Image (cartoon, helix red, strand yellow):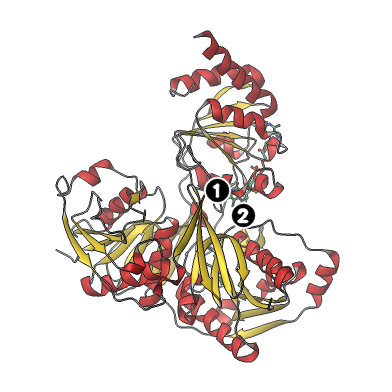
Amino acid sequence: MSNPVLVFIDHDRGAVGDDTRQAFAFARACLPDAAVAAVVIGGDTTPAVTGADTIWHVRHAELDDYAPEAWGDALHQLAAEVTPSAIVTTGTERGNEVLAHVAAIADEPFAANVVAATPGAPWQIRRARWGGSLLEDATLTAVLPILSCALHAYPSDPSTTSTTSTTSNPNVAEFVPVLQPDAGRTRIVDRVQVAEGITLTTAPVVVSGGRGVGSEEGFAAIEALAELLGGAVGCSRVVTNQGWRPHADQVGQTGKRVAPDLYIACGISGAIQHWVGMQAAKQILAINLDRDAPMVTKADYAVIGDLHEVIPAIVDEIRRRRAAT
Amino acid sequence: MSALRILVSVKRVPAPGAQITLTADARAIDARNLGFTTSPHEECAVEEAIRLVDTHGGDITVLTVGPPEADEQLRYAISVGAHHAIRVGNEEIASGEDPDPQATARAIADAVLALEAEAGVFDVLLFGNESADSGGFQVGVRVARALGRPIVNGIKAIDIADGVLTARRECDTGFEVYRMPLPAAVGVKEGINLPRYATLPGRLRAKKADVQTIDASPPRGGLATVQFATPAVEVTETVLLGTGADAAGAVVDLLSELGLA
Ligand SMILES: Cc1cc2nc3c(=O)[nH]c(=O)nc-3n(C[C@H](O)[C@H](O)[C@H](O)COP(=O)(O)OP(=O)(O)OC[C@H]3O[C@@H](n4cnc5c(N)ncnc54)[C@H](O)[C@@H]3O)c2cc1C
Ligand SMILES: Nc1ncnc2c1ncn2[C@@H]1O[C@H](COP(=O)(O)O)[C@@H](O)[C@H]1O
């Protein structure tokens, strides 16, 4: 039995996302023989994380809300005590950030965006580069291996969360780190609420527009369709660069990663940097003038035509059928 | 309001289109027919530096660890408003080797210390959230840690007042706010601004600008590339639902099938 693998839990004031299940799947895929120890930093109630064999609850006044430097310090200290066989998490913003801090403190390598890993001396790993459009085979030579898996690379298998002893509460142990007085200097000091309801990353349907939409006003039809379907609006980088939509709507390598049930790509060519942001969609429908656009040839379904005619026709047809029933 | 000394770390990366081809030995991207660019997040970091200096006064140094060809990206930064350009490298890097994240960070941190010994501390170190090609999510954090400066990544708004840097990071429902004392470091995300284009006088200035070079041979870190591979492309049988507005019926049939319409 090897030493446990520490899984950093990305949570916001106690709320965890699906990425945590991906992290457990990743941990068990890498180190099937190791116990999985979840690390929950901050908060004062016993964390309710299922899917781990044990939980480390890391507590300190400086750690209550997210504070990347202090969380990194704390996780590093815990690792020094536990000597895990690896520290892993999913490549969320916080996951990558905290692990980068641990790696920097320990002067150990950190492999982000991992899609496959085999332990050993050295570890053999495969990483997604270019946001996922290229794979890199690499070796990871480390005393303390630190890895994050690429988002959606390890599908959150529900059985992963139930194979463990967690039908009842697994062992929760407390760890109190010793922090420097200024460790909390990069803490969240305030929050600004903007979005409510359906967000781009959680919407079951995303209707996305690209250069083919042609203007800010052109998005009215896309918004109408998204609203009818209970979905969110996305866009390509050309669109944000033109100022037609805010960057928060951008899908792709330097935008958001989405994995909806249906992705409707309107007037988007399907450049690799866009594709990597939505390739995890279950179904893809492309609406494009160009039958040979990569988005069309890679999609499950396609309509060839001018989106300015096609989308209003779809909107009308949905309304017509809804009115008829 | 005191003037700001800002340093921006940028990386030269190839700009691939719809497909990536590899060299025969699979150790690099075949860049013969490709253009090169600055990673998008870093392009926004350069723009943010220009806007901060427009407001507060000061000067901007751009730095890269890269081959002599990376002068193209440094000069681009000068053409839009940066003042000084530094290229850090050695023979291996000049021949195209991309140093690992630990070595890159070491080289940047050492160069920052050398530059600061000459002309004073940088109030702000700007990085991209992640480099476009490697996507390591760590060089900025390592540099900041080595220099003992605070850093937050993923930042989409920066505001500086009274020696305090306020930064906003986008999250699912809005923004998180962070506040750090200067000197500080920030990992910037695309969307923080829309980068400007170079003007003709800017381009002329960039052409004539000096690029200072610094030699560095940092020790290798623990992550080593063996080779690259292109992911298997899933062959999809695309179902054509029709052409033009006439396809609407078939589309809505599909939406109903998926339980959406
Ligand atoms: C490092 C890096 C990171 C990047 N990150 C991202 C990213 O995060 N997200 C992203 O999207 N891009 C990103 N890009 C940019 C990417 O390479 C492409 O330039 C971009 O995705 C193209 O956007 P587009 O498909 O809207 O435009 P185009 O490529 O110009 O495609 C327009 C499409 O619309 C179709 N069309 C035109 N008119 C109509 C009409 N009336 N009806 C129907 N179809 C029509 C055309 O046939 C064409 O297929 C990145 C690039 C780099 C180098
Ligand atoms: N070779 C380099 N030269 C200068 N800056 C770099 C280099 N590599 C990475 N950086 C900086 O560090 C950030 C994070 O890079 P990475 O850790 O590779 O994702 C980038 O956005 C750059 O700002």
- Confirm or reject: label 1 Cβ below 8 Å from ligand 1: yes
Q: To which residue does mark 1 refer?
A: A252
What is the three-letter code of the residue carrying label 1?
Gly
Tell me what residue is drawn at x 63 percent, y 46 percent. A246
Q: Disc 2: which chain?
A: B
Q: Nearer the viewer, mark 1 or mark 2?
A: 2
Q: Is residue B157 above or below residue A241?
A: below
Measured from the top left, where is residue B44 in percent x and y? Answer: 64, 61
Q: To which residue does mark 2 refer?
A: B191
| Residue B231 seen in the figure | yes
Q: Nearer the viewer, residue B28 or A41?
A: A41
Tell me what residue is drawn at x 47 percent, y 24 percent. B260
What is the three-letter code of the residue carrying label 2?
Gly
Which residue is the extreme one toward the bottom?
Answer: B118
Assess disc 2: are there few (<14), some (14-19) or many (≥20) residues with their C-alpha within 10 Å of its C-alpha.
many
- The quarter of the picture where residue A304 lies is top right
Q: Disc 1: which chain?
A: A
- The quarter of the picture where residue A87 lies is bottom left
Measured from the top left, where is residue B22 in percent x and y? Answer: 54, 58
Q: Nearer the viewer, residue B244 or B137?
A: B137
The secondary element bearing badge 1 is classed as loop
The secondary element bearing badge 2 is classed as loop
Q: Is residue A250 above or below residue B135?
A: above
Measured from the top left, where is residue A201 in percent x and y? Answer: 47, 43
Which residue is the extreme one toward the top?
Answer: A324
Q: Mark 1–mark 2 contact, CB under 8 Å?
A: no
Instruction: Tell me the distance, in whole angstroms, between the alpha carbons under discs 1 and 2.
Output: 13 Å
Compared across the picture, whether A133 is left or right of A245 comes to left
Ligand 1 rendered quadrant: top right
| Residue B77 seen in the figure | no
| The N terminus of chain B sits in image quarter | bottom right
Assess disc 1: are there few (<14), some (14-19) or many (≥20) residues with their C-alpha within 10 Å of its C-alpha.
many
